[in-house]
Amino acid sequence: MAGTGLYVGPNGWQSWQLRAAADDPAALSQIRLREVATPERIAAEIDLALAEADTELADSFVGLAQERGIVVAPEQSQRLATLKDEALSRAVQDFGYGFFMGERVSGAGFAGALTGDVIGFGDLRDLAHEGQKLVRGEAIDNTILALAGAGLVLSAATWVSLGGGLPARGGLSIVKSASKAGKLSPALTAGLARTAASAIDRPALKASLAAAAKLDLAGARMASANLIRPAAMKSFAALGQDTGTLYAKTGQRGLRQVLNVAEDAGDIGKAAKLSSTAGSKTRAILKLLGRSALVLGGLSLTAASWLLALVGWALAVAMVAQRLGWWLGRRLMPGPKRQAA
């Protein structure tokens, strides 16, 4: 029983912790990091991030290393500082390219693309592009249409609120960009497509596309106010708010990490909750754990099995203890018949 306990006990205890933290991404990720956040793994991930010139991810791993008491090599810190200095010279060029082309690979590129979307240029461009496809008899992308239409509505709200809607506006912008680039997970792509298909008001669609074809921003905004049904508009706004929170904490590359593993909008909300606790370390956690940082997932069955094993072992120990107690009692406290004999 003692030997079995040494095997069942720790696994059962960790499974109980995992089940208890199932709805808390921050606590869930901390439990799972115990096994994977080794000094060797973190050093390798920092080298990989530096090789890809991803300074944000390298910074994230440095923060995680400091939190766990792991020393970062001086040469890695020097390489990271050099990359940060070089990044500034590319920022202006990336901003302009992002504004006109909608390219969001770098942080500055995303800032340019976001500026274009906030004033309505980016969404107008996307609506016009889909309108041209419709005229040519080609299949249109309902997801891009819905996100662009919702984006125009949020852009107007952002201007009216003097920037109050900017987080949701920015978040929706990068979701649209990732969808166009095919960077969303298959499950999230399918879910957004279903939502978009039911969200678009077909009579208002023609008016929106007609205004976009003329590059009439005011007309496109007015038409888009009726393009997305109210219930779907609330869902898109919530999605934009969560992704905006993630962008503020992790940058556009961190947000793309989440969009690449999230299976639905709920996963994005959990990632936003994780980022509120983990801050800049969120990207490193997601890189090490993937979607398992957000949900218990397929391990829920394994965790339940270990919990049942722990309960069974505890019952077995109780039965053995009871038997042992009876045996000791008969030896140490003889009954009346044995005393008489």
Image (spheres, rainbow, N blue to C red):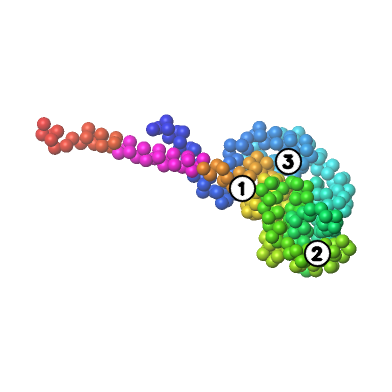
Question: Upstream in the sequence, badge 1 or badge 2?
Answer: 2
The image shows residue 10 at horizontal and vertical percentages of 48, 37
306 in the magenta segment: yes
The image shows residue 81 at horizontal and vertical percentages of 79, 40
What's the magenta region?
302-322
Residue type beneath disc 2: Lys
Horizontal side, residue 147 vs residue 217: left or right = left
Q: Secondary structure at mark 1?
A: loop
Question: Upstream in the sequence, badge 1 or badge 3?
Answer: 3
Residue type beneath disc 1: Leu
**Depth check, front residue: 269 or 153:** 153
Tell me what residue is drawn at x 70 percent, y 50 percent.
189
**Depth check, front residue: 96 or 330:** 96
**Residue 107 shows in this picture:** no
Above or below, 245 relative to 314:
below
**Residue 301 shows in this picture:** yes
- The disc placed on residue 58 is 3
> What's the CA distance linking mark 1 and mark 3?
21 Å
Tell me what residue is drawn at x 85 percent, y 57 percent.
135
- The disc placed on residue 294 is 1
State which mark lies toward you, 1 or 3. Answer: 1
213 in the magenta segment: no
- The disc placed on residue 206 is 2
Above or below, 236 relative to 21:
below
The image shows residue 249 at horizontal and vertical percentages of 70, 51
Above or below, 317 relative to 166:
above
Residue type beneath disc 3: Ala
Q: Secondary structure at mark 2?
A: helix
Give the main secondary structure of the magenta stretch. Answer: helix
